[in-house]
Image: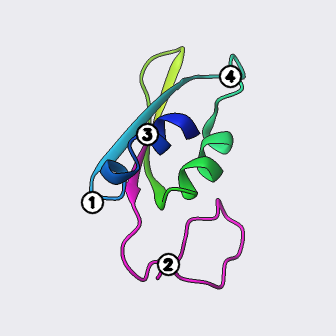
């Protein structure tokens, strides 16, 4: 995930969305909780989640807005993005 985002860093910092699909139910080491810290490194935050079917889920991420506190997955953060 980091490699893909690094390769497209300029595109994901624009006010666009990124969808990431992953297998449900522990079928993979990729899940909602493992994705959040990775995408936060790139200034993205989750803003939607859907069940695609019985096997797949997807998360929608968007670029953080100027001055918006970074997404921490529920942990407290006292700093805002520059």
Given contact means CB atoms under 8 Å apart, are the residues at marks 2 and 3 in contact?
Answer: no
Residue at 68% in and 20% down? 28
Q: Nearer the viewer, mark 2 or mark 3?
A: 3
Residue at 64% in and 59% down? 73
Residue 46, position as x, y percentages in the image: 48, 53
Given contact means CB atoms under 8 Å apart, are the residues at marks 1 and 3 in contact?
Answer: no
Which residue in the protein does label 2 denote?
Answer: 81
Q: Secondary structure at mark 2?
A: loop
Q: Is residue 22 left or right of residue 9?
A: right
Q: Residues within 10 Å of mark 4 (few under 14, many from 20)?
A: few
In depth, the one of 56 and 36 nearer the eye is 36
In depth, the one of 70 and 47 nearer the eye is 70
Which residue in the protein does label 3 denote?
Answer: 7
Task: Tell me, for residue 39, which label it has, or none.
Answer: none
Mark 4 or mark 2, earlier in chain:
4
Mark 1 or mark 2, earlier in chain:
1
Question: In the image, which residues are magenta?
Answer: 59-82
Q: Secondary structure at mark 3?
A: helix
Residue 24, position as x, y percentages in the image: 61, 22
Cα–Cα span, label 2 and label 3: 22 Å
């Amino acid at each position: 995930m980091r490699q893909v985002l690094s390769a497209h860093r300029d595109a994901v910092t624009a006010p666009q969305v990124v969808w990431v699909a992953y297998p449900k139910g522990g079928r993979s080491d990729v899940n909602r909780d493992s994705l959040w810290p990775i995408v936060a490194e790139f200034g993205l935050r989750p803003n939607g989640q859907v069940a695609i079917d019985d096997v797949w889920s997807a998360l929608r991420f968007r670029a953080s807005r100027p001055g918006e506190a970074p997404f921490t997955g529920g942990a407290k953060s006292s700093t805002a993005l520059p």
